[in-house]
Amino acid sequence: MKPINTLRGDKMIYKIESEFLTAKVKSDGAELCSLYDKVGGYEYLWQGNPSVWYGQAPVLFPIVGRLLDDRYRYDGKEYTLQKHGFARKLKFELVKSEGGSVGLLLRESKDTLEVYPFKFNLSVKFEVVGRTLKATHTVTNTNEKEMYFSMGGHPGFNISIGDFLEFDENESLSTETIDGDSIRMSAKTPVLKNEKKIVITDDIFNNDALILSGIKSKALTLKSEKHDRTVRFTFGEAPFLGIWAKPGAPYVCIEPWFGVNDDRQEKDDISKKEGIIKLEKGGSFELVYTVEVS
């Protein structure tokens, strides 16, 4: 099916579809903004209420989470970079739009080089086939040296309080504890003990996101006791998984992360940041997640 592109203000929205699903993607931030079941007549993606949380599925690059004092050092120089990086706030250019897929691209600019001293290509591709959406994020190093970065997804799905996430395997997991500045503390809090299910309660996110690591499963499923709709989310080899919403809000974000918030220990170079990815000259890195709806 041919994609449909629309203009809202000065923002392009690209629509792709299969026989079962339509998906929409904004040029700003290459952000997924709709995942709609044409058969069941149901919108799976959070629609970005600004009074609760304005986002929907931001792309996290070149950092995930927050830096200590929003600062880092590289090659002896200090830089400032805001939480989750700048990609989510910049306009991507259209590379390809055909059939059930759309591809968008972000390159470095004078502005990005002032806060992040690396050249890059960040490609984001969305594909819908049947009842599945596939999101592929590719970072390519276009420098004459190595580059350092983190990468993450952040899609939010509509839920009701009491819905739950179920991992494929029994898990024993603890969450990182973060303070009011979104900085990791040394303490961890148990979440699962040889169990599969995390129930979304009114207060589960009172202390901000769950930040999980050491997960055996490669996927989880969002389920409800109130209906039979499900969202199967595959996050693969991501070393961290963030789960978050504003407390009591009717959505949940499932976030595969290659990178994590800073802790309180000062680092003299970004190369020493926990979870940081080092990519050699000419190299590429991929983050892929899939969303299959019932």
Image (cartoon, rainbow, N blue to C red):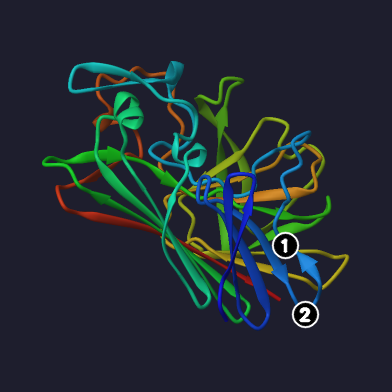
Residue 212 image label: none
Residue in front for this viewpoint, 249 or 164: 249
What kind of residue is marked 2? Val
Q: Is residue 101 above or below residue 142?
A: below
Residue 266, quarter of picture: top left
**Can I make out residue 169 in this image?**
no
Q: Is residue 88 above or below residue 5?
A: above
CA neighbours of label 1 inside 10 A, class few (<14), some (14 to 19), many (20+): some
Residue 104 shown left or right of residue 204 in the figure = left
Which residue has dot 2 on it? Answer: 39
Disc 1 element: loop
Count of numbered badges drawn on the protein:
2
Closer to the chain start, of discs 2 and 1, is: 2
Disc 2 element: loop
At 56% from the left edge and 48% from the top edge, which residue is drawn? 154
Residue 77 rendering spot, x and y as whole percentages? 23, 17
CA neighbours of label 2 inside 10 A, class few (<14), some (14 to 19), many (20+): few
What kind of residue is marked 1? Tyr
Residue 53 shown left or right of residue 67 in the figure = right
Q: CA distance from mark 2 to mark 1?
A: 13 Å
Quadrant (top left/top right/bottom left/bottom right) for the N terminus: bottom right
Residue 175 rendering spot, x and y as whole percentages? 57, 40
Residue in front for this viewpoint, 66 or 17: 17
At 51% from the left edge and 45% from the top edge, which residue is drawn? 29
Residue 42 shown left or right of residue 76 in the figure = right
Residue 110 rendering spot, x and y as whole percentages? 30, 30
Residue in front for this viewpoint, 294 or 190: 294
Which residue has dot 1 on it? Answer: 44
Residue 12 rendering spot, x and y as whole percentages? 57, 53
At 44% from the left edge and 20% from the top edge, which residue is drawn? 70
